[in-house]
Amino acid sequence: MFKLRDVCIFIAGAAFFHMVSHILLPFYVELPYQFGCINLTNSLNNVVIVISAIVTAGLLWVSTKLKR
């Protein structure tokens, strides 16, 4: 039904959306922002952006290596 390539592309899109939401977060919420036991600072937000970008690029690279 679904091919692994399609699933990788879908998850890459979700990771890209996650990255964009963290890029836009400082414009709408004053950082540092505390929710629960996590304190989201500017540096932690930057780490999340970089990790999401790496995950997105990695999933897109993997999807190019898979069969159509």
Image (tube, rainbow, N blue to C red):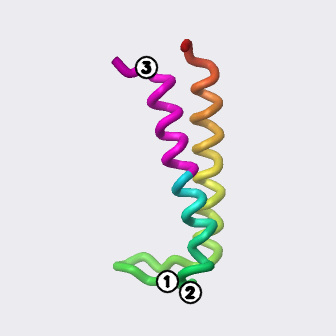
Q: Position of residue 45 (x, y in %)?
A: 59, 70
The residue drawn where x is 61% and y is 70% is: 24
Q: Do the CB atoms of the residues marked 3 and 1 lie less than 8 Å apart?
A: no
Q: Which mark is residue 30?
A: 2
Q: Which mark is residue 16?
A: none
The residue drawn where x is 53% and y is 82% is: 29
The kind of secondary structure element at disc 1 is strand
Q: What is the CA distance from the residue labelled 3 to the residue labelled 2?
A: 41 Å
Residue underneath mark 1:
33
The residue drawn where x is 54% and y is 14% is: 68
Q: Position of residue 17 (x, y in %)?
A: 54, 53
Observer-side mark, 1 or 2, equals: 2
Q: Do the CB atoms of the residues marked 1 and 2 lie less than 8 Å apart?
A: yes
- Say if 51 sits above or below 29 in the image: above
The kind of secondary structure element at disc 2 is loop
Residue underneath mark 3:
3
